[in-house]
Image (cartoon, grey):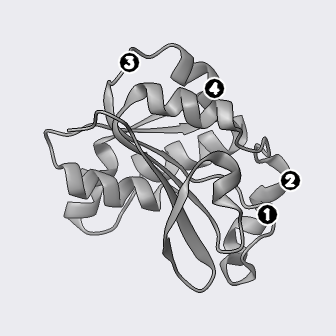
Amino acid sequence: MCADSLVAKYRVGTQGRVVALEKSLPIYIVVRHGLENYTGPERFRELAAGIELAHADYRDYLANLPPRCFDLVYFDPMFIVPVLETSSLEPLRPIACHQPLTVADIEAAARVARKRVVVKERSFFDFRSLGLEKIRSQRKISYGVLEVKGAF
């Protein structure tokens, strides 16, 4: 629920921009409420306040962005096969967007990214089917990366 966005916001700091998209309206409302009403440490409240949350389909959103306007495009889809240890997300599964990523989606993200496209998925996911290189693998979660040509 925006945990990866909080980490990204920490990394880019006050000068960097983090935009989080959520297609499912009910999940968007829950996440927005959480970001606006976070009661943890002050530093985390500042990070949460710095995340731009949008109710949008990433396909439409990416299509309307100019080329190379973000350093990185990061996908964290609802896993087809859930990680059972993270059962807190299970109640949201029926209302989540389940559209699988396609090669065209990765190409659209690469048009927008200056440096790379990253996809978070289950460790057994075939990242090569999307043209991604599997670069980091944990026991249950892995990351696929596409380095954008001409990145600086």
In the rendered picture of this protein, how many numbered marks are placed on residues?
4
Residue 106 circle label: none
Where does the image place residue 78, in percent across and percent down from the top left?
Answer: 70, 56
C-beta proximity under 8 Å, tags 2 and 1: yes
- Which is more N-terminal, label 3 or label 4? 4
User: Which quarter of the figure is the C terminus placed in?
Assistant: top left
In the image, which is nearer the foreground, mark 2 or mark 4?
4
Q: Which residue is mark 1?
A: 91
Q: Secondary structure at mark 1?
A: helix
In this view, the residue in front, 43 or 56, is 56
In this view, the residue in front, 100 or 40, is 100
Q: Is residue 90 above or below residue 105?
A: below
- Which residue occupies 76% across, 48% down? 96
- Which is more N-terminal, label 4 or label 2? 4
For residue 114, side relative to residue 64 (left or right) = left
Residue 94 circle label: 2
Where does the image place residue 34, in percent across and percent down from the top left?
Answer: 49, 53
For residue 33, side relative to residue 127 (left or right) = left
In the image, which is nearer the foreground, mark 4 or mark 3?
3
